[in-house]
Amino acid sequence: MGRVKTAGTAIFLAMGGFLFGYDSGIISSTIAQPHFTAHMGNPSSAERGGIVSSFTGGAILGALSISFLADRFGRRMTVFIGSLISILGAALQGGAANVPMIITGRLIAGFSVGLLSAVVPMYCSEIATAEDRGKLSGLLQFMLSWGFFIAQWLGYGCFQVDGDFQWRFPLAFQAVPGLIMAGGIWFLSESPRWLVETERFEQAKAVLENLHGDGLNDAFLQAEFREIVDTITAEKQIAVRSWREMVSRGSWRRRLVLGMGIQAFGQLSGINVINYYGPQIYHILGIETGTSLKIIGISGSLSIVYCVLGLWLLDRVGRIKPLVISAAGMAAALLVNSVLSKFFVLADQPSSNENALRAMVAMNFVFSFFYTMIGVISWVYPAEIFPAEIRARGNSLSTVTNWSLNLVFAQCAPIALENLGFGFFYFFFVWNLIAAVCYVFFFPETKGKTLEGMDELFGDAPFVKDPEVRVAVATQVEDAKV
């Protein structure tokens, strides 16, 4: 029963991922809608970049706020704050009268999504057992895919409608998941690890029993509770009063580099250039807006299937092998598309090759398939590698890395696509190869480790000295695998 409650909690929290995916996906179809461009005075490439990048600028600020909010007010209140902010952003976008107003709404909505994208994986990792942590933390990406799916098909459906409803309704719809999260978050349990950090031990013990108990594992629950208390109590002796102190220890520096690195590689894969500017990319190939929205919608549908497979693999195969395959597959797909576009199918050439065009569209689907694992693991990995004392700040900086690169590409991509076309994707091809090499040599496998067991993995002496506690927890993890 406890496992079911934990899964239900993680699924609800992943609504933050739905909001992330919806907000990211809806803008690509919105800026291509005829009534939107007419109402906004046919925005230039720079203005379109501003509309998209204002969202990511807000997300950077939202992710940074986690370092304060999550530790001060707890994970649950932080989710509530993010949900309320998302409702305000949706209202401003849906009622926008001009470009500055929609940019303001996007900035506020971005703050909410940046906040939620940092706190949700951390919250999920802190309530999950070691054997389920990967799939539960990875639900953010699964729900992100659902959000992207709904956004693309809603955008395509509204394309058939005449009038400003074509773009106002999809933007205003962002308020729905915000309302659901703001109302439902109070029915969930607070993170037991945050409760221990704030010395609410009895509450923490009750939450662990509620989330992990099955009536037959009292010894494991006692051992798990003791491991969490011993580790967090010891870590609190190492006071972290400033950001600089986060890099005061070698293992902490390494974890920070890995957390920021995996988020950077997710962006450097090129995924959000394709997501945000899909219609513009397909226009380069000579594909009309309606058809391009349909193609993007189909791709979003398939990404849900891909995510189910990815979540199933995550706690069975681990993190690192899928990451290597993911990066290599994306690099291959980008290389094929860049070569095909150069020699066969650019719209300004008089004799485009329809077979090559179909192959390029197919390669975008292949790229989406291989992106799945980095998409999932880039949220799971940072949420599990940091010790309790710097977990909020570490997750904050890792997520800020994601959104900072997202901002750069959102602003620069339309200009780069205008001038370079598909040649722009050679840049991402190279970075995917670099990522594959880094995963092999620098990223340790975290599958099956408890959050408190990460210290040993990264070369620190374990805070839990009691061998009985460590053996009991390790045995439970191994039994769950069987």
Image: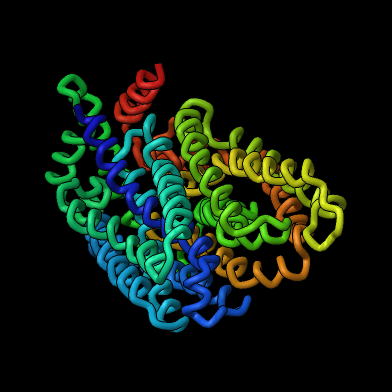
Task: Please name the residue shown 58% across and 47% down the image.
Answer: 295
Q: 110 left or right of 126?
A: right
**Residue toward you, 456 or 310:** 310
Task: Please name the residue shown 42% across and 74% down the image.
Answer: 107
In the figure, 300 relative to 157: above or below? Answer: above
Q: Quadrant of the N terminus?
A: top left
Question: Could you tell me if residue 97 is visible in this image?
Answer: yes
Q: 431 left or right of 260?
A: right
Q: Quadrant of the C terminus?
A: top left
Q: Which residue lies furthest to the front in this view?
A: 162
Total numbered circles: 0
Task: Please name the residue shown 28% across and 67% down the image.
Answer: 87
**Residue toward you, 43 or 233:** 43
- Where residue 211 appears, as percent x and y from the top left, is 21, 35
Task: Please name the residue shown 60% across and 61% down the image.
Answer: 277
- Where residue 388 appears, as percent x and y from the top left, is 35, 51
